[in-house]
């Protein structure tokens, strides 16, 4: 399962940010097209965090929809992706249609990432600084 190395990287970042304090909650953003399965991350996190200051921390996942941006006019589009069609096929169709305003080319600008939003250490909420909130993969 590909979630294990991402979960290990997440744990390493969280422990560095917590600076030796106990972590009680970790808030994450998971893009609709990230291929990250939150249930798998939870399983790996429980295993990998055993014996660390993050053991027992609650993982809170926030879903982030796919976002497309027109390269010509800058219009941002959030395509409707139904469960009836595979996500990659639906995304391909939306990209092929182009911008609804100017028919320009669209590029994917959101919904691919796996991001650390913030963590709670004791009673203290710590927002991830830019270098920790960078995407694990997909978005820049």
Image: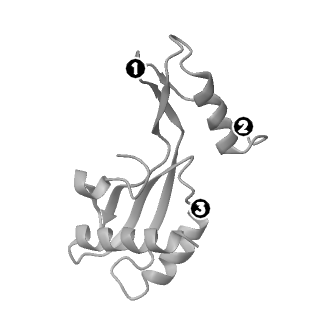
State the separation of the CA atoms marked 2 and 3.
18 Å
Going from N to C along the chain, the mark reached first, 2 or 3, is: 3
Q: Percent position (x, y) of residue 36?
A: 55, 59
Write down the residue under mark 1: 74
Write down the residue under mark 3: 37
In the depicted view, which residue is nearer to us: 132 or 88?
88
Q: Secondary structure at mark 1?
A: loop
For this view, does 77 lie left or right of residue 49? right
Q: Percent position (x, y) of residue 21?
A: 25, 75
For this view, does 129 lie left or right of residue 2? left
Question: Splitting the image into 4 quarters, where does residue 51 fall?
Answer: bottom left
Residue found 50% across the figure and 11% down from its top: 102
Pick out the residue farthest to the top. 102
State the separation of the CA atoms marked 2 and 1.
25 Å
Write down the residue under mark 2: 82
Q: Secondary structure at mark 3?
A: loop
Q: Percent position (x, y) of residue 26?
A: 40, 62
Q: Answer yes or no: do the residues labelled 2 and 1 have beta carbons within 8 Å?
A: no
Q: Percent position (x, y) of residue 15?
A: 29, 74
């Amino acid at each position: 399962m590909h979630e294990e190395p991402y979960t290990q990287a997440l744990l390493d970042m969280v422990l560095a940010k917590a600076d030796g304090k106990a972590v009680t909650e970790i808030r994450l953003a998971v893009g609709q097209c990230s291929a990250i399965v939150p249930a798998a991350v939870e399983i790996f996190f429980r295993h990998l965090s055993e014996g660390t200051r993050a053991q027992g921390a609650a993982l809170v996942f926030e879903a982030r929809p796919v976002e497309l941006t027109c390269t010509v006019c800058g219009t941002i589009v959030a395509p409707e992706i139904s469960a009836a069609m595979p996500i990659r096929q639906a995304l391909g169709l939306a990209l092929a249609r182009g911008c609804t305003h100017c028919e320009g080319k669209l590029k994917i600008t959101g919904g691919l990432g796996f991001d650390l939003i913030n963590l709670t250490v004791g009673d203290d909420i710590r927002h991830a600084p830019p270098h920790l909130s960078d995407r694990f993969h997909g978005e820049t």
